[in-house]
Image: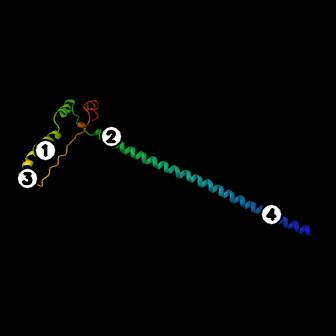
């Protein structure tokens, strides 16, 4: 009889192991489904972030486009080549101001010092900074 008892114990143990194996398989399937779901959610989140970044870039470009269209529609006054040449041939304010300060310094040397100080700042225009040849090349764009 000891073999019968032993056989029954082995059968019980086998049945218990089979139940455990089925339970482990069910748990594995559940975890695999959870992992797949999480992978899809992560992929969706990355796509949403990329989509949001694209939306912002598009909004920025649309804004820039609108600004440029508005700027294009503004009426602008264009100077003729002759006017630009006259401006470059005429003495600039810087030259006149320098001459004025030189004449003012001479009388100050004769008079006693005062607390009044005059500072002369040269005013330069964008056209005066560029060479004459460059201005002619880009006369329609400046």
Q: Residue at x 52, y 50 (%)?
A: 46
In the picture, the disc for residue 112 is 3
Which label's residue is closer to the chain start, 2 or 4?
4
Report the residue marked by disc 1.
101
Horizontal placement of 110 versus 51: left or right? left
Q: SS class of the residue under badge 2?
A: helix
Going 75% across and 60% down the picture, which residue do you hit? 21
Q: In this view of the protein, can residue 76 be seen by the observer?
A: no
Task: Say which residue label 4 marks.
Answer: 15
The coloring applied to the image is rainbow
Are dots 4 and 1 in contact, CB under 8 Å?
A: no
Q: CA distance from mark 2 to mark 4?
A: 80 Å
Q: Distance from label 2 to label 3 (Cα)? A: 60 Å
CA neighbours of label 3 inside 10 A, class few (<14), some (14 to 19), many (20+): few
Using the numbered discs, state the Cα–Cα distance from disc 4 to disc 3 in whole angstroms.
Answer: 119 Å
Name the quadrant containing residue 123. Answer: top left
Q: Residues within 10 Å of mark 1 (few under 14, many from 20)?
A: few
Secondary structure at badge 3 equals loop
| Marks 3 and 1, the one that precedes in the sequence | 1
Disc 1 from disc 2: Cα separation: 46 Å
Identify the residue shown where x is 46% and y is 48%: 53
Height in image: 48 above or below 128? below
């Amino acid at each position: 009889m000891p073999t019968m008892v032993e056989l029954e114990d082995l059968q019980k143990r086998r049945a218990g192991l089979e139940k455990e194996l089925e339970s482990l398989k069910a748990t594995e399937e559940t975890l695999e489904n959870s992992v797949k779901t999480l992978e899809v959610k992560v992929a969706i989140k990355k796509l949403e972030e990329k989509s949001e970044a694209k939306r912002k870039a598009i909004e920025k470009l649309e804004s820039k486009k609108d600004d440029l269209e508005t700027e294009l529609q503004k009426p602008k006054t264009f100077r003729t080549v002759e006017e630009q040449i006259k401006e470059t041939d005429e003495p600039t304010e810087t030259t006149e101001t320098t001459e004025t300060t030189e004449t003012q310094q001479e009388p100050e040397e004769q008079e006693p010092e005062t607390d009044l100080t005059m500072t002369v700042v040269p005013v330069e225009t964008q056209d005066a900074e560029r060479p004459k040849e460059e201005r002619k090349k880009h006369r329609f764009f400046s």
